């Protein structure tokens, strides 16, 4: 039963991550040029490395720091979720 009791916290972390990602996208849209991002992706969705450093739409320090903050939030939620999923693997299904 402990296995199934872990699903609610996992779902909560997923919902939290999705909210953080939506906020990240709103800030990222103000910083990154979508045409450059599209150029760095092939038809299969793989990211292509670039030799240049593409220009940003803005270099506003506050906006860049906000983007970094959202990345840290998402990373924390992802790590927490991965830890919970690892623990789920160790629990019996009964």
Image (spheres, rainbow, N blue to C red):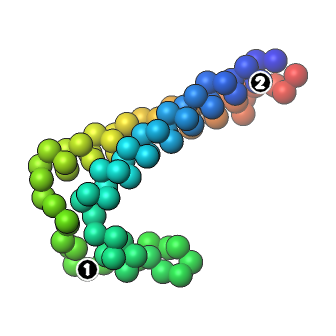
Residue positioned most to the right: 94
The picture places residue 46, in percent across and down from the top left corner, at 50, 73
Q: Residue at x 76, y 24 (%)?
A: 3
Q: Is residue 51 above or below residue 14?
A: below
Residue 53's image quarter? Answer: bottom left
Residue 69 visible at all: yes
Q: Where is the N terminus found, in terms of image quarters?
A: top right
The x and y percentages for residue 73 are 37, 36
Helix, strand or loop at mark 2: helix
Residue 39, position as x, y percentages in the image: 37, 80
Q: Which residue is mark 2?
A: 4
Indicate the position of residue 23 as horizontal and vertical percent values.
38, 44
Mark toward the viewer: 2 or 1: 2
Mark 2 → mark 1, Cα distance in angstroms:
48 Å
Q: Categorize mark 2 by other alpha carbons within 10 Å: few (<14), some (14-19), many (20+).
A: few
Q: Nearer the viewer, residue 46 or 61?
A: 61
The reply to whether the C-beta atoms of the residues labelled 2 and 1 are less than 8 Å apart is no
For disc 1, the marked residue is 51
Relative horizontal placement of residue 87, taking residue 45 as reference (left or right)? right
Q: Can residue 79 be seen from the camera position used here?
A: no
Q: Is residue 83 left or right of residue 6?
A: left
Q: Quadrant of the C terminus?
A: top right
Does residue 7 lie above or below 14 as drawn? above
Neighbours of disc 1 within 10 Å: few (<14), some (14-19), many (20+): few
Q: Which of the 4 quarters of the picture holds residue 68?
A: top left
The residue at the point 56 percent across, 78 percent down is 44
Q: Residue at x 28, y 40 (%)?
A: 69
Q: Indicate which disc, 2 or 1, sits on the residue closer to the N terminus.
A: 2
In the image, residue 56 sits, relative to residue 94, either above or below, namely: below
């Amino acid at each position: 039963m402990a296995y199934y009791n872990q699903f609610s916290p996992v779902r909560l972390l997923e919902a939290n991550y999705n909210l953080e990602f939506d906020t990240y996208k709103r800030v990222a849209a103000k910083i990154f040029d979508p045409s450059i991002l599209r150029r760095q992706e092939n038809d299969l969705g793989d990211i292509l490395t670039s030799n240049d450093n593409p220009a940003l739409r803005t270099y506003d320090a506050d906006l860049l720091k906000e983007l970094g903050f959202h990345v840290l939030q998402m990373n924390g939620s992802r790590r927490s979720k991965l830890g919970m999923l690892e623990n789920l693997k160790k629990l019996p299904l009964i």
